[in-house]
Image: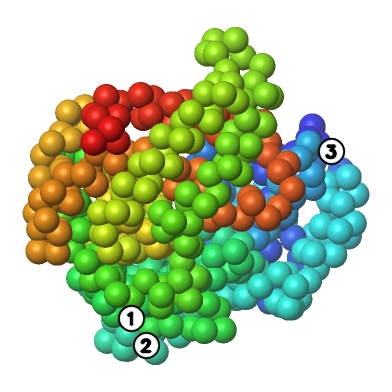
């Protein structure tokens, strides 16, 4: 880090990451920075780690410089350096000690030659290499488009809250003077499929998704009406509502799984999962071999093979129940379940899979851990009621017992992309894989599961 650079710290109580910030304005080729000892370094912003960078950067810039701004893109100078955020100033005029300078006047060591070229491309408005959101003025264009599709009677305030940002991804909330807020979401590779999947879901189960207002195919984006807020913590009534709502949504996708697979949903049907068990065992064995901590024992190859045998039996029993495949959300967290009164909707379908619906129930049940309640039986009853229209009590009860271990297998398999790429996982990812292997081990020792498999 350049020692003369100005650093704004958003929240010093948390572990932080520092970003270099390139501040630019539409219609200008200048960068806004400060003079430090006769030179022009890039300012820095420190934000909390493990939170949405675009959201935190926007808030830090607003708090530190009193600027309304939008993050256009984030560039990286390498794993050993601070990332660089290119930010458009939306305020009329920067205040304080910020002054406009040419990009060529910024200290040479502040940017690599590649970064300078990319920033020049962004400033010029060329989107061919970076995507539609990595350019000045896209927010103004989005506001004009939204005004056309929602009607001139709704007036936007100009307040934009940003949650995700890159050249081809966007998630932002736009405030209005009266009435609901609106959300713009866009996805690029590898999540372009979310556009089509969320559109299909909005057609089959509109009551369980935010209302879709309009689309922009050239951005792979869609506009949604605000559907409520996530809960700060889960209550029992909210969990029951979420579980029963998910059951009804899943039932609405029965018979349409082929269409969802064609739209880009990941194939996590039990038959697919069990067909890759041998590869998963090799994967887990590789991760276990790299364990350096002595706090917990490694799971050896012999035990992994025993676990795989139990998992295979559980998968075969699950398939024999003849439960129809449905859509499975696969990314349940507090932010993806929204409530307004007693209504409940689900967002963020980029990790959508097709598989046994009870695996989705297991994902949703994990959220109860923050509630401090042992509420498994109540949630199972809510989910059971949602499926009694289609399944027998015998099918449902057996699925509840088999789902935990099969759900861990589905989580390990994920999108299945790791099967086709060289395994160069960072240490933290391999540590997580080892933790999942231990979850599998515990699930394989569950007496209730073993009793079902023995009959």
193 on left or right of 290: left
Look at the image and tell me whether residue 347 can be seen.
no
Q: Residue at x 59, y 64 (%)?
A: 190
Do labels 1 and 2 touch, CB within 8 Å?
A: yes
Callout in the foreground (3, 1) = 1
Please, is residue 300 above or below residue 392 in the view? above
Kind of element beneath mark 1: strand
Do labels 3 and 1 touch, CB within 8 Å?
A: no
- Residue 213 marker: 1
Which class describes the residues within 10 Å of circle 3: few (<14), some (14-19), or many (20+)? Answer: few
Kind of element beneath mark 2: helix
Please, is residue 261 above or below residue 1 in the view? below
Q: Position of residue 414 (x, y in %)?
A: 51, 51
Residue 391: quarter of image: bottom left
Q: What whole-number distance in Å separates the C-alpha atoms at marks 3 and 2? A: 50 Å
321 on left or right of 282: left
Q: Residue at x 58, y 42 (%)?
A: 278
Q: What whole-number distance in Å separates the C-alpha atoms at marks 1 and 2? A: 8 Å
Q: Quadrant of the N terminus?
A: top right
379 on left or right of 409: left
* Residue nearest the observer in this picture, 164 or 302: 302
Q: Position of residue 45 (x, y in %)?
A: 63, 42
Q: Position of residue 210 (x, y in %)?
A: 28, 69
- Residue 37 marker: 3
Q: Which residue is mark 2?
A: 149
Which class describes the residues within 10 Å of circle 1: few (<14), some (14-19), or many (20+)? Answer: some
Q: Tell me which label, 1 or 2, sits earlier in the chain.
A: 2
């Amino acid at each position: 880090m350049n020692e003369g650079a100005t650093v704004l710290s958003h929240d010093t109580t948390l572990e932080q990451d520092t970003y270099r910030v390139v501040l630019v304005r539409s219609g200008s080729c200048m960068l806004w920075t400060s003079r430090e000892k006769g030179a022009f370094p890039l300012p820095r912003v420190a934000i909390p780690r493990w939170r949405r960078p675009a959201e935190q950067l926007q808030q830090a810039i607003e708090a530190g410089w009193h600027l309304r701004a939008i993050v256009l893109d984030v560039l990286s100078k390498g794993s050993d350096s601070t990332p660089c955020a290119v930010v458009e100033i939306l305020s009329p005029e920067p205040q304080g000690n910020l002054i406009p300078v040419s990009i060529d006047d910024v200290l040479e060591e502040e940017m690599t030659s590649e970064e300078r070229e990319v920033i020049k491309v962004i400033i010029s408005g060329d989107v061919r290499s970076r995507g539609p959101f990595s350019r000045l003025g896209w927010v103004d264009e989005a506001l004009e488009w939204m005004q056309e599709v929602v009607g001139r009677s709704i007036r936007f305030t100009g307040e934009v809250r940003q949650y995700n940002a890159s050249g081809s991804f966007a998630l932002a909330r736009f405030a209005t003077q009266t009435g609901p807020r609106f959300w713009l979401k866009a996805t690029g590779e590898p999540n372009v499929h979310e556009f089509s999947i969320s559109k299909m879901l909005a057609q089959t189960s509109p009551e369980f998704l935010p209302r879709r207002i309009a689309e922009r195919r050239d951005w792979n984006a869609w506009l949604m009406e605000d559907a409520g807020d996530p809960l700060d913590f889960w209550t029992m009534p909210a969990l029951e509502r979420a579980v029963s709502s998910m059951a009804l949504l899943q039932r609405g996708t029965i018979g349409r799984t082929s269409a969802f697979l064609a739209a880009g949903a990941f194939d996590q049907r039990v038959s697919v999962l069990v067909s890759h068990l041998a590869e998963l065992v090799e994967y887990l064995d590789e991760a276990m071999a790299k364990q350096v901590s002595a706090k917990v024992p490694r799971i050896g190859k012999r035990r992994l093979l025993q676990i795989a045998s139990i998992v295979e039996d559980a998968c075969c029993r699950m398939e024999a129940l003849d439960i129809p495949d449905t859509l499975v959300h696969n990314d349940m967290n507090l932010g993806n379940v929204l409530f307004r009164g007693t209504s409940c909707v689900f967002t963020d379908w980029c990790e959508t899979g097709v598989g046994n619906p009870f695996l989705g129930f297991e994902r949703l049940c994990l959220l109860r851990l923050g509630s401090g309640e042992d509420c498994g039986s109540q949630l199972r009853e809510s989910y059971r009621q949602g499926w009694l229209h289609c399944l027998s009590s015998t099918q449902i009860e057996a699925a509840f017992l088999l789902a935990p271990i099969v759900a861990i297998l589905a989580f390990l398999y994920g999108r299945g992309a790791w099967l086709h790429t060289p395994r160069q996982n960072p240490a933290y990812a391999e540590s997580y894989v080892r933790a999942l292997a231990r979850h599998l081990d515990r699930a394989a020792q569950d007496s209730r599961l073993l009793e079902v498999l023995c009959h």
